[in-house]
Amino acid sequence: MKESLFYSKLKNDFVRCELCPHFCVISENGLGLCKVRRNIAGKLYSLNYGKTVAFGVDPIEKKPLYHFYPGSLTLSIATTSCNFKCQFCQNHEISQSVTDGRNISPELILDYCKSKNIKIVSFTYTEPTIWFEFILDACKILKANNIKTVLVTNGYINPKPFELLSKFIDAMNIDLKSFNNDFYKDICGGTLAPVLQTIKTAFQKNIHIEITNLVITDLNDNADEFRDLVNFIKNINNEIPLHISRYFPVYLLKNKMTSLDKMLEFYEISRKDLSHVYLGNINNDAKYSKTVCPDCGTVLIDRNQYNITENFIVDGKCPQCGRKIYGYF
Ligand code: SF4
């Protein structure tokens, strides 16, 4: 347990958590919506500090991050629970229930990375920001030891805590689940505006960002709404990679899997405005997982699922025309 860094004390030993935009008001002995923050005698505590439910090594492509040291391995770590309730959560076993997990420390993560020569640590699978105090401590130590830090996140965090954490974060994959606030409210238990703010802030702070959008049949597959989403990214920077991911029925949602036609339609829409668009969860995805020079069309990185088969990028540039490619290679 560790005392929360962002909360206010209220009357009668109530507290208000200020970590995420839910702003839970919590009575004594009560829990926040994420179920990992408890009010104990008028103070708010993170219950999951140093508790992990997933600890393993993945290709960085699996996050997905395609423009952040392609071909590298990353240590992937998760805690239990989430501040969203997405009805389509692929990791619902660990995100929608609270389990105790194994004890770890920032030092243990660092020692593991050193012993395995791993240069990137990703906080992933469930929502890392509800593990705020732990990832802040871990990222400080990791950065001080030249290990890159990654968040795979729903972006649902308040500006002040994000300001503090962002100093120690190198890259983020942020889920932009829809461009419709009702979708966020009804299907995820959140709101859209704070996510958009996190994306903008992360980019302004020079954090490497990539965006993932899961396209769900009949829920967020309206082409006009998708154009708005693409426009939002373009207005920040049209070089930001967009990963369009195909939905399959999972957890509480029984909608039909997304058709290939819909995936290709959205690919064409986004390619008009964005330099780097990828399709995920489709068979034979090689054509849609290549990194291509936006100027001259040269294939720069070829992928087979999560494996890099070719990487022709030289000094972060296209070897053919010299164009700078967004990211770190
Ligand atoms: S982090 Fe948890 S307790 Fe805090 S506001 Fe968000 S959901 Fe509520």
Image: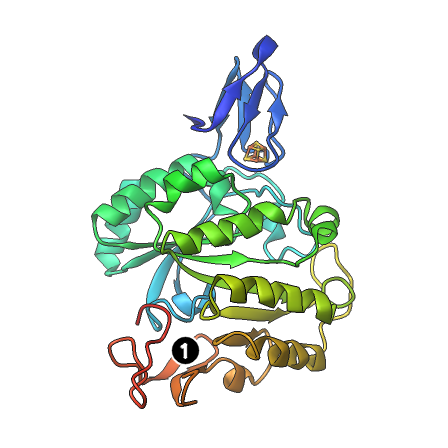
Residue 313: quadrant of the picture: bottom left
Where is 15 relative to 223, above or below? above
Q: Residue 29 versus residue 312: which sits nearer the camera?
A: 312
Residue 91 in picture, x, y percent from top left = 59, 54
- In the rendered view of the protein, which quadrant contains the C terminus? bottom left
Residue 240 in picture, x, y percent from top left = 46, 67
Q: Is residue 197 visible?
A: yes
Quadrant for ligand 1 reads top right
**Image point 55% across, 82% down: which residue?**
285
Q: Is residue 247 visible?
A: no
Return the residue found at the far front.
235
Report how many numbered discs are placed on residues in the image: 1
Q: Residue 290 versus residue 53: which sits nearer the camera?
A: 290
**Image point 26% across, 43% down: which residue?**
141
Position of 227 with respect to 111 (left or right) is right
Secondary element at image label 1: strand
Where is 146 relative to 97, above or below? below
Position of 5 with respect to 18 (left or right) is left
**Image point 52% across, 63% down: which residue?**
235
Label 1 sits on residue: 307
> Circle 1: is it few (<14), some (14-19), or many (20+) Cα within 10 Å?
some
